[in-house]
Amino acid sequence: MNSKQIILVDIDNSISATNEKLKEVVPGFTTERYPFPFPPHFFEESSIFDDVKPVKGAMEKLKEWHDKGHFIYYVTARDSSSFHRTVRWLKKHGFPSSLVICSKNKQRVASIIGATIAVDDAPNEIEQLKSVVARVLVPAHDYNKQYENRFFNWSDVAI
């Protein structure tokens, strides 16, 4: 595509390897059970996001898209109390600077910003985003095998 795209990018398990960190710190955590039953307020009270590693190749691909003039919006279902922590994490790992939006309704955000493409791993989000954007790119995980446009490596993703 030659035209400039507006890309909604999820953070957890799309560009950050959150599941890998959860496997280290949460007894019994598995990606085969989705969604996993976390204790109430687990993410709001945890510093888990600080130590999560980026998904290999994600930063480089987003920089490539940004440098080509595409618009990137980081949209996460994280609680708004994680906003500053999220911005620091993106900066620390060299992701292109852009707007970060914490929202439990990514479909609405995608509609408001006029997103043409979305990147998300979560089945509930993928289902909702499919009705708003032209294409949802899906980082491959055990729990999203049924979706089109899955990818295993960021280097293989083209828009």
Image (cartoon, rainbow, N blue to C red):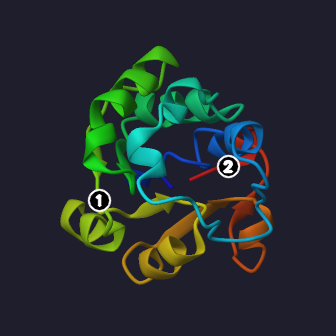
Q: Quadrant of residue 150?
A: bottom right
Mark 2 lies on a secondary structure that is loop
Amino acid type at image mark 2 = Val
Q: Is residue 122 above or below residue 157?
A: below
Residue at 41%, 72% in the rendered image? 133
x then y, percent, for residue 13: 62, 49
- Type of residue at label 1? Ser
Q: Which of the numbered marks, if any, corresponds to residue 7?
A: none
Q: Nearer the viewer, residue 150 or 93?
A: 93
Q: Is residue 77 above or below residue 83?
A: below
Left or right: 69 with respect to 108?
Answer: right
Q: Is residue 11 above or below residue 92?
A: below
Residue on which the image places disc 2: 157
Front residue of 127/18: it is 18
- Residue 5 shows in the view: no
Q: Residue at x 27, y 41 (%)?
A: 81
Q: Residue 74, image x and y in percent?
A: 37, 45
Name the element at disc 1.
Answer: loop
Of residues 154 and 14, which is closer to you in this image?
Answer: 14
Residue at 79% x, 51% y: name it.
Answer: 152
Q: Which residue is mark 1?
A: 103
Nearer to us of marks 1 and 2 is 1
Residue at (67% x, 71% y) in the render: 34
Considering only order in the chain, which callout, 2 or 1, is on the residue closer to the N terminus? 1
Q: Is residue 91 above or below residue 9?
A: above
Percent coordinates x, y for residue 89 in the rendering:
45, 25
- The answer to whether mark 1 and mark 2 are in CB contact below 8 A is no
Side of 66 relative to 149 (left or right):
left
